[in-house]
Amino acid sequence: MSSLPTGAVTFLFTDIEGSTRLVQELGDEWAKVIEEHDRMLRETVEGHGGSVVRFIGDAVFAVFPFPADAVAAAVAAQRGLAAHPWPGEVAIPVRIGMHTGLGALGGSDYVGIDVHRAARVSAAAHGGQILVSEATASLVERALPDGADLLDLGKHRLKDLGEAETLFQVSVRGLREVFPALHTLELVNHNLPVQVTSFVGRTEEIAAAVRLVAGSRIVTLLGPGGTGKSRLALQVAAEVAEGFGDGVFFVSLASVTDPELIPSAILGSIGVSASSGRRSPAEHVLTFLQDKEVLLVLDNFEHLVSGAGIVGDIARSSPGSKMLVTSRVPLHVSGEQEMPVPPLAITAPDTMAESVASVDAVQLFLERAAAVDPGFVLTDANAAAILELVRRLDGLPLAIELVVPRLRVLPVEQILERLDPLTLAAGARDLPERHRTLWNAIAWSYESLAPIPQNLFRHLSVFKGGARLQELEFVCNFRELGLDLLDGLAVLIENSLVRRSDRGGGARFEMLTVIREQARQLLAETGDEELLVERHARAYLALAEDAAPLLLGRERKARLDAIAVDQDNLRLALDFFVVHGRTDEARRLAWAMWRFWQTKGQTHEARQRLDAVLAMPGGAPACRAKALEASAGIAWWQGDLVLARTLYVEALEIQRSLGDQKEIANGLYNLGLTEAFGGGEAARAEAAIREATEIYEALADRGGLGDVRWAMGNFVIHRSGDPEDSLEYFRASIDDYAAAGNVFGEGWAHFELGSALYRLSRLDEAMRELRRGLELLYESKDDSAVVMFTLVFAAVAFARGDTERAYRLAGAGWALRDRSGIDLISLDINQIPGLDLASLEALTGLERNAYLTGRAMPAAKAVALALDSP
């Protein structure tokens, strides 16, 4: 051990690409090849001042005190391997990867995230290629061997699921310098979350799970909370990602409380709106996935097993897709392959450091200990205590992670002594042994806190998916506790009870599900739960109502993102108001949420939620009117104009009775626009719009005037059929919306103006307006805008004779319409010969290929193609 360098070192990994094929090709000669390969690499490493840590099959792990020596060794190795006369004149393609970081020893081997990062850099390479991390590249760029150059390959996410980092190729003149795309996560479409710690051990479990995924449609990783199922599933997904042409998607179900919302969660994770017209999300997900090859990682399924039928339905309807599930209980669906996930290995042949260092649970302990105390090392003196500690913790990863922070104040031996007197919390004695161990680990961390941080820990359990500082302050009322918020959170983070994340663009504080469950039970025992849950609901009502007026303006994207990241908390709040019969607050929250639901394509959930709040008894007329208006708005975007009109009529009647002129004008605008689109009487539509105009003029309301002028432009087109007469209305509405700061309205006014100009064959002008409108609306990832703009861009391209672009855009638009539930566009686009759906489906040859290419196009590419139109 003492011969290996520590401190700042450069790790080098190699392995032979395609070794299985070479074994078959070379037969008995393979053993000689490996012997010669190992000799050459050992001599090259040691000849450049490095040390071979170990040989692993056909791979080598080496370490160097100086990065320039490591790179020189890699260059020499590739030159020597390329020039060597191998049996049968075969090439031995060796890939090499390097990373510079902290060399911390655990026994006779290195521990720490930097070792894993170096291994992953190597795994990203191709045979004959040398890759280095940015850390290494920055140290060697002026000290490269003769004939070697650094080539910046850009940012890549390695399969350790860490943050993307820049990789460099060391190109060697005279050897191969051009290689295919790296074996990184950039090769596939995915949403796998970034992990801030390395994945330790589980080599056998990963290999077993990879085999099961290869041979089964549904694989369920089973085990109690804290065994590391989720982390294992993510790592397996990263390993097999390249085998799924349409992507790998992580679907977190921990915060989903209703089994009926599983399809919506799946659609949201793969970037598809959770509604498609009148089809349910379940029907939508089956239709969308039927011709796809995806891997769905369905995480934390145990509380939703009554809804597991959707898993079997997907397996039957999408033969190219597979599902990797984590759960505490089996799903019991046809085709399910169960794989129990045991705790980490905890046995060693003896208690000497070298033996103990190879134990998975000890490796995890050492990895995490290095983060807490960089000077902590495994020695013969403490090896027995560390092994006994992880054994007492049953090898449960979460329990180990919770205990490691104690190293800040206690040596391992004293931590071990304090495990013995731990007693189980009330109500936990009937838990299975491994659950009791985890409960103990959490309880110990909890009991080590002072009383005030203990209160904070319990209070945080009312949040689902974490919370921002603002909501934490309101709900937990830290001033009552006599605690500084940031100090308290720092204590909980130090004890691994809370973690900080940046989801949504700002600081959030979250609990793992198993920790939250225990904290919630502890809260229930105090009698404070009811008060905190009520505060929680009020906090998120305030968040939604603060955001609602800004969902049309310049802060639109930020506010939509804020609602999205807290949607689980908002659902809890709405459920609370409905269950407790608080009609007005339920309707206020539903009203505040409806524009978010529409923009993100969650119209199915919106319909269910709005129907529920409208069915509640009593309540103030003003709140009912706004809920009716929200429900009508959802019906409008679903293309159900009959229902929309019915709801708008009732809402207007209530607003007239209340006498608020601005609300009356808004009700008249909504009703007049629906009448114009939906086949109502022209005189009634025009009268409603003109009455609304008079009110807004009296109020000098520029936003309202933008609405009614936009509505009048549409009325003119849909009833008189003369687009020319509509142009002045749309241009005026653009000015009004811009003055009012209404980005949503401004974008749609450009859309209507561009559409009118298209009808007049003024195509260049139409393109300018359409581009401006789409740029305004797509900034906030507005699904409805992508659908409608893409199809009109297709119509303009078709009119110009650019049929390939037209068919690709039309394919994208129609497919996006199916995925988003936005049906309004079909009212117009089906009237264009050649772009109606029936004509497109009948295309043949190259034209059909263009159409099908468009149908497979994601929204971002469709937008780019539209904006790039000449």
Image (tube, grey):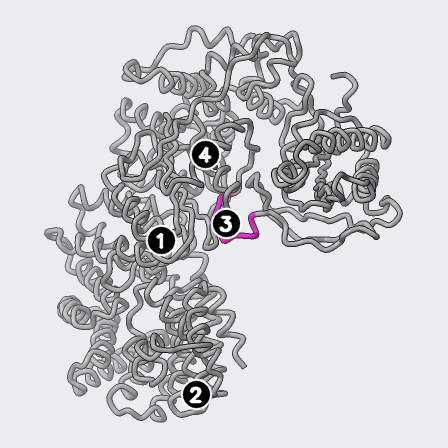
Q: Identify which residue is drawn at 32% across, 28% down.
A: 520
Kind of residue at badge 4: Ala
Kind of residue at badge 1: Leu
Q: Earlier in the sequence, mark 1 or mark 4?
A: 4
Badge number at residue 267: 1
Furthest residue to the right?
A: 146
The answer to whether mark 2 and mark 4 are in CB contact below 8 A is no
Kind of residue at badge 3: Gly
Q: CA distance from mark 2 to mark 3?
A: 42 Å
Residue linked to disc 3: 505
**Which is the main secondary structure of the residues drawn in magenta?**
loop
Q: Residues within 10 Å of mark 1 (few under 14, many from 20)?
A: many
Q: Identify which residue is drawn at 69% across, 53% down.
A: 179
Residue linked to disc 2: 799
Q: Quadrant of the C terminus?
A: bottom right
Residue 723 position in % (x across, y down): 34, 90
